[in-house]
Image (tube, helix red, strand yellow):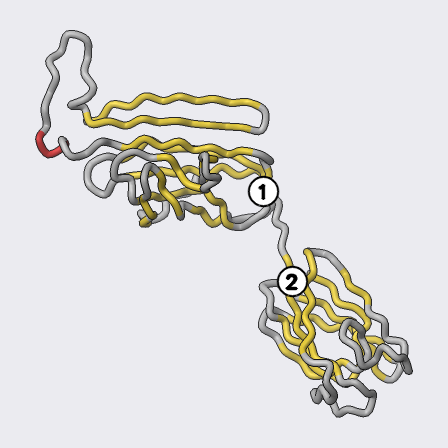
Amino acid sequence: MFGASVTYQSGPGRRQLTVDVTPDNEVRCPGAPRRSIPELNDSTGIVGTLQHTGTPVAVSRTLTFFTTTAGGVRALNVRGFAVEYRTKQDEGVFSDWRRATQGQGTLTGVTHQITGNNGRKSVTLQLRNGRFAVSPMYPVSFDFVEIYFCALQYRRADHALAPAGVAEGAIGLESLRLQMGERKAFDTTWPSPNEKRPGFGMHLRTATNVGDHAVELTVRRLGQTETITLAPGGRQSFQADLVSARCL
């Protein structure tokens, strides 16, 4: 048996839910004798403070539960042996219990992987000490907008006669990072003094998608323009100019 007290505070840009859970040898009705349960004497219960501060929009697939402490540490404030946690989203089922890291009054590494499309989400967190005490459920609601990046690596030759897939010359490996929906256009003017310099689009020879989202490449060869989609992990050889790249 456990007793609990719940405090909820709400204000502009701030939501806080505080739940105290204590063994019932510390909680009693008025006039009732205090009960002693020996096996619970070493369990101080769980105190958790969950805050969702700042913007109510989550822009990452991983949601981290945290409180803002004096040192700026992202951690749950707890008391006792709350070394395990589980989460669920909306009306779904709870995940398996997972281990977290307990510090001096804090619990770190408590995350939830957001699923589904953009929109309103509600994620619930529950803690336990691995022995006796299980906390009530801490709900947090927020609006989810997925914002991600694409990553491309490519090699170019420094002259037009290099064979397909062969990046002759000393330009080296070039990298490109694009935000969701962003398009990058390249200077493909030739002949040009820039053809031997990084950052331009002449003489593309290989391209590799090293990110988690598809990249659309527009290339031009012998005056003909073609659009190619590279899936994550995809690699392709070219003997063309790179006109533009877009993060899908």
Name the residue: 77% across, 91% down: 162
Amino acid beneath label 2: Cys
Using a 10 Å C-alpha cutoff, classify the residue at mark 1 as few (fewer than 14 neighbours), some (14 to 19) or many (20 or more). Answer: many
The residue beneath circle 2 is 150
Q: Position of residue 5 (x, y in %)?
A: 32, 21
Q: Is residue 156 left or right of residue 60?
A: right
Q: Position of residue 82 (x, y in %)?
A: 29, 39
Using a 10 Å C-alpha cutoff, classify the residue at mark 2 as few (fewer than 14 neighbours), some (14 to 19) or many (20 or more). Answer: many
Identify the image quadrant of the C terminus.
bottom right
Q: Is residue 177 left or right of residue 192?
A: left
Identify the image quadrant of the N terminus.
top left
Mark 2 or 1, nearer chain start: 1
The nearer-to-camera label among 2 and 1 is 2
Residue 144 circle label:
1
Q: Position of residue 196 (x, y in %)?
A: 80, 81
Amino acid beneath label 1: Phe
Asked which quadrant contains residue 120, the reply is top right
